[in-house]
Image (cartoon, coloured by chain):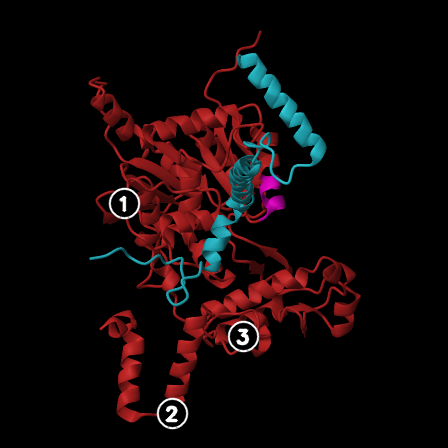
Amino acid sequence: MLCTWTLRPGVRSAHRALRASGLPCIARRQLMGFVRNALGLEPPPSPMDPTPENRFHPWDQSPVDALRERAARIKTLAKCPVTGLNVEYTCPLSGIPTHHSREAWEQDTQYHATKRYETLKKVNIYEHDLRSGRPFPEFDFPQEQGYDKVVNMTNWDLFFYTRGFYSMDTEFQLAAVTKMLSYPVTIASLLAQFSPYSLNPKGPITLEGLKSLAAVRYTLYSQSFNNSARAGGVTTGGALKNRPMRLFVLGARAEAQLPGHVWKQLSYLFPEQSFEMVFIGPESYYDRARGQYVRSPTPVVEKVDETLKFIHYTDYFHVLHESQDFFPYDPYFDCFFTFHPGFASPENRDTWLSNTLPALLDTKCAIFTTGFDRDDLMNDVALLNEKFGSEMDILMEPTKNVFGSTKWELNDLNPHEVYQFNMYIAGFRGKRYHTIKR
Amino acid sequence: MGLEPSRYQDPRTWKMTPAMLRARRPFFARNMAALVLLLGTTSAIYTYTYGFLHRDNDFVDVPIPPVDEGELEQLKQEYAAHLESKK
């Protein structure tokens, strides 16, 4: 009785098969398994388990079509950093086309000294792992958090452990999941009362930043304030204005396509508050049936459940701001996020600077922005300071995002440029008080 | 209906998974320091008490035979003086 109870179903059926057929090889494996179990040793690794070795293929000889095409695209678009010619040689260490020829690859001392090929190899193996067809149990996200269980937001590992995610033992599983969860959890980590970012000088949050975050937290946790007040026999003025919190995501692209259960992870962290995710930008609504971004004159509303709603506005923010679609703004209920906007990048600098940013600063709500890497965000913040220095407050100094994606990405135009989504983060806001000249 | 097994333990060997070890790493040094402190305190108290109780000096003034001649003589005098004082 005890024996059948302790055996797991799979083992039990194997037992049954053994009894039926009596195959000696199964018997040996069973015996080995028993001995290993008794000694407390690890089971042998399954061939499906990802390792850097079994996920490594040069991209131009990859078993995956998409990656062979990508290697071809790099070869047509990118230029060798040494010779300035087309990229034709695939680096044997990273498996990614990086240089014009073997000679150029050998001459690139900076490439070898900085060990950039190690990061490039990570790009390679993560991409292969996503397409390997292994089971992905880590995408089974946990549901509600028990009220007595506090979520620790110190880093990804502690967040996953305290939230009860699948035990992600390899970097491959982390890369797959953190890329997806980076958007909701970055937002949650800024707004949560146990945020990993502390006040200056110990952390990146400035005093103005704390003012803005305190306003938002007052809304997020107002239910618990009221409950404790009521338990003490004190009647406050009742709950705050009863409307969902609006989280605006400007220039939304990938984040607007994340499925509902991913954004739902944000709601599970703030169970008492309902949210409206407002995705704004010409690429904020992707029609899966038609396979393209769709512009719509009216907002497209998707309701995930009672407490979470997606609203896609497929126009620029300044247009909607001028037509007062979102009016009134309330710093207690509204918060803005721009994920890798690239304020300083030449292609969309004009739109941001001349139209969208003045409108954003006009809202007087907190705005948080992220960058692909340190330089990207530093350029953005430098440009903001230069153009709007007197009209805005810095809420958060540029700092490494605790909940950035751990998956390394590659720029096809220049394979030497590797980045991670939401790697760095900063915050700013239009000045709330009129400056008085003395 | 029982307790669910933790996802952060290997279902076969009951060892902590690498993910759990990573999650516990920030606390490892301080946990170990606390462990050393607690073990040090208890073992110091224990060894002090053990040493104190084993210092057996309750009857050190009682002479144990064989007693040598000179000491016997001295003891006899002491006893005589004692009897003298009683009278």
Q: CA distance from mark 1 to mark 3?
A: 41 Å
Between A310 and A319, the residue placed more toward the observer is: A310
Q: Is residue A341 visible?
A: no
Residue A203, horizontal then vertical, whole percent: 55, 32
Residue assigned mark 2:
A24
Disc with the residue nearer the chain's start (1 vs 3): 3
Write down the quadrant of residue A76 in the picture: bottom right
* Residue A429 within the magenta-colored segment of the rendering: no
Q: Amino acid at mark 2?
A: Pro
| Boundaries of the magenta span | A373-380
Q: Main secondary structure of the magenta part?
A: helix
* Vertical comparison of A272 with A284: above or below: above
Q: Amino acid at mark 1?
A: Lys
Residue assigned mark 3:
A54
Q: Split into 4 quadrants, where in the image is the C terminus of chain A?
A: top right
Q: Secondary structure at mark 2?
A: helix
